[in-house]
Amino acid sequence: MYTVYAFSTPNSVKVPIALEELGVPYQLNPVNLRAGEQKSEEFLDLNPNGKVPVLVDTDRTLVLSESAAILVHLAEKHGKLLPRDALGRARAFEQLFAHASGLSPAFGQAGYFQKLAPEPVPHAVHRFVTEAKRQLTLLDGVLEVREFVAGDEFSIADIAHFGWVWRRGFPDLSLDDAPNVKRWYEAVHHRPAVGTAIGKVEALVPAA
């Protein structure tokens, strides 16, 4: 049994998706980022970096942060969502790392400088929006030749990319010029486990 500390964010949704796909029981504990709960002493005791998600096992012998690390741990522990052949694993990790170093920060910074920065920074907006669009184009090229981002099988690499494509409205991005990403996104979004996970993380947001 796992406990997942999360909110309705691109990185948080990845962990419930993996657990739902694996059919593993878990408890979802909200960390309200809008109320600053990620800065509380209790949460910082779990993750000094003050970010969600965090995965904790039943007896707290494992406390793990960073969504990519959590995805790898769950896939390896439960024997699913990661190809077993060497090339397939390499492709999955290639996309997982590409997401962590490229697409995720570009999408996040593009959204921040457009919507949350205390004052306009045109150069930063141009830089990160341009990079986010470039990352989306790169992903579209990958999906032009593959059904899923690492090959023929759905994997943790798809889960990683899905989180930010799901929240693409934050950086004001569209899939209109990325038809392969759009096809892939619709296929992933309609997976029952994905729909269940999205519903659960969206329910973490307090009613206005």
Image: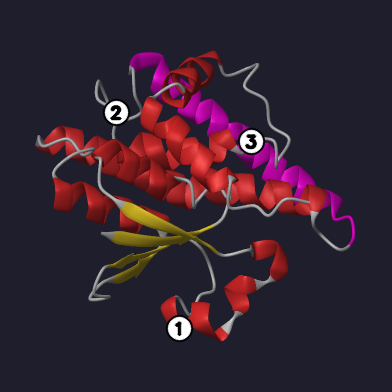
| Residues tagged 1 and 2 counted as in contact (Cβ below 8 A) | no
Q: Are marks 3 and 2 in contact (CB under 8 Å)?
A: no
- Identity of the amino acid at label 1? Asp
* Residue picked out by circle 2: 154
Q: What residue sits right under mark 3 in the picture?
A: 168
Residue 64 location (% of width, % of height): 34, 68
Check the picture and name the quadrant holding the N terminus: bottom left
Residue at 35% across, 15% down:
145
Q: Position of residue 182 (x, y in %)?
A: 53, 18
Q: State the residue at coordinates (26%, 24%).
A: 151
Cα separation between marks 3 and 2? 21 Å
Q: In this image, 207 relative to 67: left or right?
A: right
What secondary structure predominates along the stretch shown in magenta? Answer: helix
Under circle 2, the secondary element is loop
Give the structural element (helix, strand or loop) at label 3.
Answer: loop
| Mark 1 surroundings: few (<14), some (14-19) or many (≥20) residues within 10 A | few
Q: Earlier in the sequence, mark 3 or mark 2?
A: 2
Amino acid type of disc 3?
A: Arg
Please tell me in which quadrant of the rendered image residue 93 appears.
top left
Image position of 49 with respect to 147: above or below: below
Residue that mark 1 sits on? 45
Question: Which residue appears at 26% of the width and 35% of the height?
Answer: 91
- Residue 179 falls inside the magenta stretch: no
The range drawn in magenta is 119-145
**Residue beneath the point at 81% across and 59% down:** 117
Q: How is the image coloured?
A: secondary structure
Q: Earlier in the sequence, mark 1 or mark 2?
A: 1
Q: Is residue 56 left or right of residue 61?
A: right
Residue 125, horizontal then vertical, whole percent: 78, 47
Q: Residues within 10 Å of mark 2 (few under 14, many from 20)?
A: some
